[in-house]
Amino acid sequence: MQSRSAEQTIRVVIPDGGLRADLHIEEGTDPMSVTAEVILAKLAEAGTEVTEASRTVCSDLVGRLQSLCEKGGTVTALNGTPPDHGAEGYLELLPGIDPTPDGRRASIVAEAAAAPAAPSKTATKDHYNRSVYCLIAKGQPVGRIVPPRSGTDGRDVRGRTLACKQSRPADCQLDDSLAVGHDGTITANHDGILCHEPPRLTLRQDIDVGGSVDFATGNLDGPRDVSIGKAIRDKFSVSARRDLSVGGVVEAATISSGRDMMLTGGMASKEQGSLRCARDCTAKYLNNVSGSIGRDLTLDREMVNAQLDIGRGLMAPDATIAGGRVVIGGAVDLGTLGSDSAKTVLALGSLPSLSGLLDNARKLLPSVEERVKKAETRLAQLKSINGKLSHAQAEELTELEFGLAEARGKSEPLAAGISRLSGTLSRLTTIDLIVRQRVFARTLLCVDNLIADFHTDLQGPVRFSLAEAGGLVVTDMTTDQTVDISNFAKVTADLEAILFRASPERKPVMEQAPERSAA
Amino acid sequence: MPGAVSNAALIGNKNMKVLLIDDSRTMRNIQKSVLSQLGLTQIEEACDGQDALSKVGAFQPELILVDWNMPNMDGLSFVKAYRQLNKQTPMIMVTTESEKSRVIEAIKAGVNNYVIKPFTPDLLAQRIGETLSKKAA
């Protein structure tokens, strides 16, 4: 077969949107006709950009194309540059921070599944404490906003620009609960629960659980209000720095609120639950509960076997207190007091939180005053020395002067504080008890230093108050007749023994309540 | 200590670094308490002149309270040695040495003020306030 010229047999193909130019040479081409000029002319004819680089490429291709002349073949002559589209900005959360309850629940389940079947005694995990809510503390970093990386345009073999895409910033909307630093770091402006509903990322301060608090939610510590739709199960703890409301039953759990508490379903279980409420509490019933309520308790049905300190009043005209020990600072309006089966102790006009503080302050004052007196005596001795003081005496005098200033600085505010506290205590406490239905025998009513131990049942409605002479009197609210309580109860004077035997570990309410009111 | 609180207004720079040099820990605690009433909390302590010289380089005090009678290196020797290194930092001698000649000797060595023991917390606070306001002027 007669060989043909390269001008006839070389074809240029430009595939891939112009990113490549291939040279196809047919079989039976005369190798001598393959020259750089022919190749360049073919490429230029196909519309490719002629540059110094393409000229060099053509020279380099001559040898390769000549080797394909006999059988034919294809070589790539030119390559374009594809566009670099850069990278979109995105939200990157720190490891362990998962703002979706389902995501956190999944990781808790996965962790539990990965744990050995029989864990060692030292590697125990507190399953109660693993909350599905992502609680973030003020100032805590949660992640960062990664900025977009801009891309660069490409160029095809014809010399045309291949435009890159515009990379966009992270699709993330933050509110003022989160702050973004110069480097994109996101930190919490206050305590809260991290929530991510793309594109919004926010810290919610209120917790609203539709169902129950159990292993599916873990313990809860709400930075503000906490609302539970159903129950709080045994041994879980829920605290709210403001209001706490629970729709279902609270079992033997630990609950606390910095302000009000509403227990629509009540609190009851075989074991004792713990309740701390800094302000007012409303409950259907409180059975087997210990703790304190800073102000008023409104009770619908009953309080059985409770160990409770109530700072102000109890409004429970249809409810029963049976068993346990209840200390109340203010007025009480109650349905039934006591029961056939259990001894019930009700102490009136007492505020254990403030009384405890007052007792401590009163115990402290004499020792501070004693220090002042001793220092003053020694100071007078040293000052009365005639002539020059020794170095040691001069140093001792300085120490005494300082000790005296310090002790005086403590004793004066302490005395003022005691006086204020006594005033507050007498203002807040009152003896006013109304029992509308019945007071059972075996009930102990404690007022000031008196204990009335009821030996017979007393039919209501009756009102208990202090007589001007100092004793406890009972007024029949139907006939308005007043009689001494000794007609129904044996009266003795041993209040401290009864109170502290019943609750030796009692602590002041103010130590435990996070946001107690000024009162 | 109401006097200390009123003198606190004289202290402009609450981040001022203060070096206390006294062999008595109680005395250092007293001085520390007065300083904290004045709002000064950056305090370093030394138990004698030698200890103090080893600390001034790193701590760079802006006020020094120094006792006279101490073991190893007494306060006067420290003042002389320190003034070779630094002529600016105000120094207050807090001592039982009450004779006039001793006061003059200390002033000549380079102290800026002098407090004689026994002193009251108010007096020490007042002297610190005076010394710093003079230095600032």
Image (tube, rainbow, N blue to C red):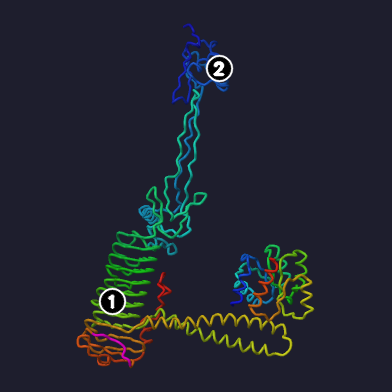
Tell me: A82 left or right of B48. Answer: left
State the residue in front, A35 or A412: A412
Say yes or no: labels 1 and 2 on the same chain: yes
Above/below status of A125 relative to A488:
above
Instruction: Select label 1 or label 2 by which is in front.
Output: 1
Q: Quadrant of residue B98?
A: bottom right
Q: Which residue is mark 2?
A: A63
Q: Residues within 10 Å of mark 2 (few under 14, many from 20)?
A: some
Amino acid at pointer 1: Met
Q: Position of residue A308 (x, y in %)?
A: 34, 77
Q: Which residues are magenta?
A: A462-468
Tell me: A244 left or right of A371. Answer: left
Name the chain letter of the residue that bears numbered label 1: A
Which residue shows up at 73% across the image and 71% down it?
B112
Q: Position of residue A149 (x, y in %)?
A: 49, 40
Name the chain letter of the residue that bears numbered label 2: A
Locate the C terminus of chain A and report the quarter of the image it occupies.
bottom left
Q: Which residue is mark 1?
A: A315
Q: Position of residue A180 (x, y in %)?
A: 48, 52
